[in-house]
Image (cartoon, rainbow, N blue to C red):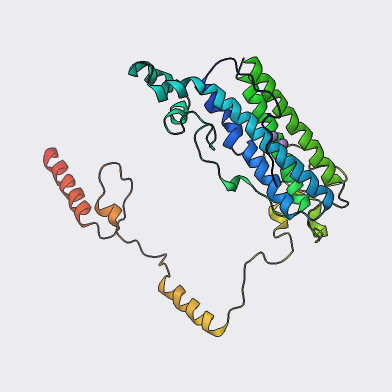
Amino acid sequence: MFMHNKRLQYTVRVSEPNPVLGSLMLEQFGGPDGELAAAMRYFTQGLAEDDPGRKDMLLDIATEELSHLEVIGSIVAMLNKGVKGALSEASMEEADLYMTINAGGDSHTQSILYGGGPALTNSSGVPWTAAYIDSRGDPACDLRSNIAAESRAKIVYERLINITDDPGIKEALGFLMTREVSHQKSFEKALYSIQDNFPAGKLPGLTPYASLYVNTSQGEGDATGPWNEGEQWERLDDVEGNLPLDGGDGQASVQLGERDMQDYAAMMGRLASDPNSSPATGADLGAGPGAGKLSDEDMGGAADMAEAKAMSRKQSAL
Ligand code: MN
Ligand code: MN
């Protein structure tokens, strides 16, 4: 069960209202790398987790992410306090109120639609979606995804810190950013505490391909590094000369039954193209200046036109 403590995990001190900054802060409220996405990601993973240690960690971190959601949402609410009051009490001249809610970003949507409360959207007003959660129910996959998610959240917080000079907001965002660093460390430890965590799953990779680097983008800019060179790698530069990699004929085939064969042959015959035809098309019939070269077959109108032009040249020569 969940309990709620009325104190935030970190104190929110906002110097003054700023609805534009509020709408930017929504990125970490309802955005893809935001706190709701983080909480739901770890909560759903935790429910399904069978390992007692990982389950405990996932539910601890999920619950903390909900607490972060509360902190960032409170920042948004404080930043919108001024415009919220002004809008609901109609205390300003229309023109002034209009200017206030249209200060920038999607702050007008935050004011008009959401009444100054934190909306589950990103900073552009795009509604939160469960599609942000990419769990697959395998710890070697999900922990790696969680590590990436924490590093993304860290970077977005860093960017938000860089766009405000409000010391209280900077401080709270610094706390939230640092907690993502700490979560990343926990997920890294949890991943490496699973023996044989790479590759994910039970099936091994196929030996001939597992250490193969395929240099498919060739030309100036070809580079080498530890990711494609060294004793760990077998590097393939002659890509075309080695196709297909399995030594087969490189074609796609399937065994069809009698009935499927008949249908397939009939369909092929019906839809066959004639490479020797040069049919006039709508493009030829409707062609005007700039149409480029046209079909030479059945060019009634165009042929007449060409003939008429030739005639008039002849007449002016006379
Ligand atoms: Mn968080
Ligand atoms: Mn986190």
| Residue drawn at point x = 51 percent, y = 22 percent | 81
Is residue 238 rendered to the left or right of residue 271? right
| Residue drawn at point x = 25 percent, y = 60 percent | 298
Q: How far across and down, in percent of the image, does residue 317 sit? A: 14, 38
Is residue 19 rendered to the left or right of residue 68? left
Q: How far across and down, in percent of the image, does residue 169 sit? A: 64, 20
| Residue drawn at point x = 59 percent, y = 34 percent | 29
Vertical comparison of 271 with 307: above or below: below
From the viewer's side, name the closer residue of 68 and 247.
68
Q: Quadrant of the C terminus?
A: top left
Q: Is residue 7 visible?
A: yes
Q: Quadrant of ligand 2?
A: top right
Which image quadrant is residue 152 in? top right
Q: Is residue 221 visible?
A: no
From the viewer's side, name the closer residue of 248 and 101.
101
From the viewer's side, name the closer residue of 177 and 80.
80
Q: How far across and down, in percent of the image, does residue 128 sit? A: 55, 41
| Residue drawn at point x = 71 percent, y = 66 percent | 248
Which image quadrant is residue 60 in? top right
Vertical comparison of 88 with 313: above or below: above
From the viewer's side, name the closer residue of 252 and 125.
125
Q: How far across and down, in percent of the image, does residue 253 sit? A: 62, 71
Is residue 70 rendered to the left or right of residue 179? left
How many marks can you see? 0
